[in-house]
Each structure stands twice: as structure tokens, then as C-alpha cells.
Amino acid sequence: MSDATAMIVLTDVHKSFGAHHVIRGFSAHVEKGEVVCVIGPSGSGKSTILRCINGLEGYDRGEIEVDGMAVDRADRSIVAIRAKVSMVFQRFNLFPHRTALENVVEGPIYVKKEPREEAVERGRALLARVGLADKEHAYPAALSGGQQQRVAIARALAMQPKAILFDEPTSSLDPELVGEVLAVMRSLAEEGMTMIVVTHEMGFAKEVADRVLFLDQGVIAEAGKARELLTNPRNPRTQDFLRRVLHPL
Amino acid sequence: MQRFLVDAVEFMPILLLGVKLTIMVTVGSLVLSTVLGLVWALMRVSGVRALSGTAIVIVNVIRGIPIIVQLFYIYFVLPEFGITLTALEASIIGLGIAYSAYQSENFRAGIEAIDRGQIEAAHSIGMGWVLTMRRVVLPQAVKIVLPPYGNIMIMMLKDSSQASTITVAELALQGKLIASSTFKNMTVFTLVAALYLAMSIPLILMVGWLEKRFGRK
């Protein structure tokens, strides 16, 4: 069922927290090199879907496959899957007791067992790439939110993943810092990284995403090409959501 | 005053024998309680129900029985099951086990204070439970755990005197023996108190130093 170009395939995924049925039959597939934005009202299950893909949450029913491997968080294979799909979190989640560079090389050295010099060299290059070459010795507390998130992206890239999941990566940033993070994400997309991005940045979705999924109450209410869906939504719920996001007053 | 000094010089060598045993009991039970406490704490946060349940039972049983009774049990009852220990061994094991419960609760508080998001970040770069503990959780928990740990060390130093109840001739017991044979209560117990205080000061300084060392990052 997974064809050669599919990176992430979800088939009829269901997930409940207690009596709360959050994901009610979610199916989607993401191609290699594709950028998919997931939008939708809060509580619609956007983050939960991402967290199911790399096994931070379990799911109750359905199937999730990453690069041909079934996701089962109870199985040892989950470690290999997490090395293939990195994640960038809303609240950065950097390790506060380690410097920017140490955060970046932690996975390569301790999980992938790369030689330290090699990992450090690549780590420096990644920090330079996200524009933080001069911050390698800084601890997270000394960095702005935008800088922390860029370190977190470098940390995700250091694992040399096949795909990156972004869970509202700019939602806890001051507005003037959003741009620097989105710029890094855009350059990743241009280089062909497979990305699933949960976001409220409609401008970014329109410019960068190949496809947009509108999630409402645990199901995909509408899916389509980014520009089309965002400028000309068909589903009245999508229309209503976009109106409220784009014109909050 | 002169009389006091003369007596002090006479009693000091005997009291120092007691100091030596006090230090052995304290250090031995400190090491044992730290190791056991860490084991209970890690079992408790393991997420495996059988392990965390066992840890809860162990900690509460240990906490619920007076140290002195635990010492009597190990020294006087275990021989009936063929396990005979010297008084020193029994006191180190007894105090070590008794204090492991408090160590464990302290460690657990430190571990649970670490933000859930960091554990998820560790998992998301492929770290398993052991690596997440070793590289992410414990290095940060140490800072949180240190001030109460210093408190526990000082309490253990003083509670090592309970070893006297199973015949370990540590400082408190040596003092009592000298006092009861010379009736120089004031001289003897002043010296005993001063010696305990002298031993606790380096501990207090050490904790301060450790807090500085681990705290600034």
C-alpha cells in the first residue's frame, strides 16, 4: 500500500484521550520532498497527529508508516523511526544545561554514535546555516525565542532526518522573531526536505507549502493545493476558519 | 577551665576512636542510601507499573518503621535466619536502608521537576529511557536535589548515633561510657557535641560548594 515515493502514510488513524475522541479517522500521505501544512482550529487534533507520527503518542486504531516502517511506540523500531523524522516543538524544548552546539551534537554523538569531531564539525555548519555561528557556546537561557527555535531546527537537522515535523514552531515567538524562523524553514523546503508543518502562519502555508490539510474535529475537512485552498476554500468551515484567522477583528 | 582542658586531653583519644566509627557508619550508610534511593526513585518513575508499585511499597514500609527497630531487626533477628553481621555492618546496612526512603523521595522530586517537553525532545532525537535519564534528566535533577541532599547528609551524621543501640562504639556511645565511669558529664558531652558540630561543618561547606559547582550553568 505504500508506494515508492511516499514518505509518511497515515491510514484511518483514530486516537482518544479518555472519553475524548480527538482523531476520528485521519488518512493522508506525504510524498518525499513534499511540504504539507496542517491548519485548523485549536483542539482539532493537529498536534496530536504529528505526535503520533513519531510515536510521542500512541494511536488506538489505523496505521501509520514512515519510510515503509510501521510506527509502534512500544517496539524498539521506534528509535529508528525517530531518527528518520525529527521534530521541532512549539516551546523549543532545548536542553537548558547544554550550549547551543551541545544541543545540536547530542543526538549524533549519543544516539547515532558518530565520532565527536565529525559531529561537532557538522553541528557548527548547521548552526552557521541557521545563522547562529557566533552562538555555539551560548546556553539556551541567553538566546531569544527565535534563536532558540533555530537551534532546535539545527538539532533536528543534525539527525540527518528524512522528514521534519514542525509543531506550531512560531506560535510562542514574539511577532518580530517569527520571520527568522520561517526563513530557515523556507530554505529547508527549497532544498527538498519533507516537512509536515502545523501552523497558523497562513502566509507561510500559501508561499511554501505544496498542500494544505484543514483539520476540524479530528478529521480532514478539506485538503488541496496550498494556494487554491487558502484563497478559494470550498468547505464553509474552512471559509469560516480562514476568515477568523486572517481578519481577527 | 584548666580542669576541663586536662580532662579533655585525657578523654580525647577515646572519643576520637568513636569519631572514626561515626565517620565509617555515616559514609557507609550515605553511599548505600544514595544508591538504593536512586534505584527506588528510578523504579518509581520507570512507567512500568510493577516496578513503580514495588518502589512505593518499599519506600513506605521503610518510612513507617523507626530506624532503631530496623537496626534491632537486622542485628538481632537476621541471625535467626542464618545471616550474622557485625555490629558495624548491621548499622551501615540498617541506616543505609532506612535513609534510602528519604533519598528516594528527594530524587523523585528532582526527576519529576524536569519539564516534560525536554523528555519529549530527547525521545524525538531517538533517545531511549536510559539515555534520556543519563543525559537530560539526571544532570538537571542534581541541582534541584542537592540542597535537600545536604540536609540528609547532616541528619545521617547525627542519626549514626543510633548505631550505639546495637553496640557500635561510635562517638555518642564512647561519650556515654566515659561519662558514666567518670561522672564528668559536662566535660564529656560538651566535647561530644563539639565533635559532632566539627564533623557537620565540612559537610555544610561541601554542599555549598557542590551547589555552586552544579548550579551555575
Image: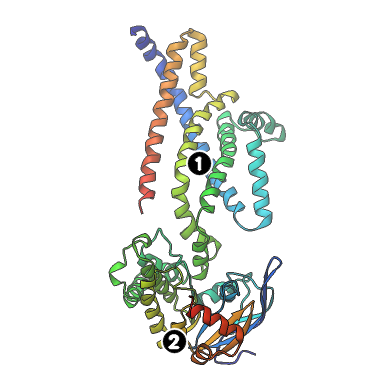
Question: Quarter-wise, where is residue A136 in the image?
Answer: bottom left
Closer to the camera in the image, A27 or B71: A27
Q: Quadrant of residue A183?
A: bottom left
Q: Amino acid at mark 2?
A: Val
- Chain of the residue that carries numbered disc 1 in the rendered image: B
Which residue matches tag 1?
Answer: B31
Q: Is residue A128 left or right of residue B111?
A: left
Kindly identify which residue carries mark 2: A208
Residue A66 visible in the displayed image: no
Q: Amino acid at mark 1?
A: Val
Instruction: Give the structural element (helix, strand or loop) at label 2.
Output: helix
What residue is shown at x 39% (from left), y 10% (from top)?
Answer: B7
Nearest to viewer (mark 2 / mark 1) = 2
Q: Is residue B71 left or right of residue A249?
A: right
Give x and y (percent) for residue A37: 51, 83
* Quadrant the C terminus of chain B occupies: bottom left
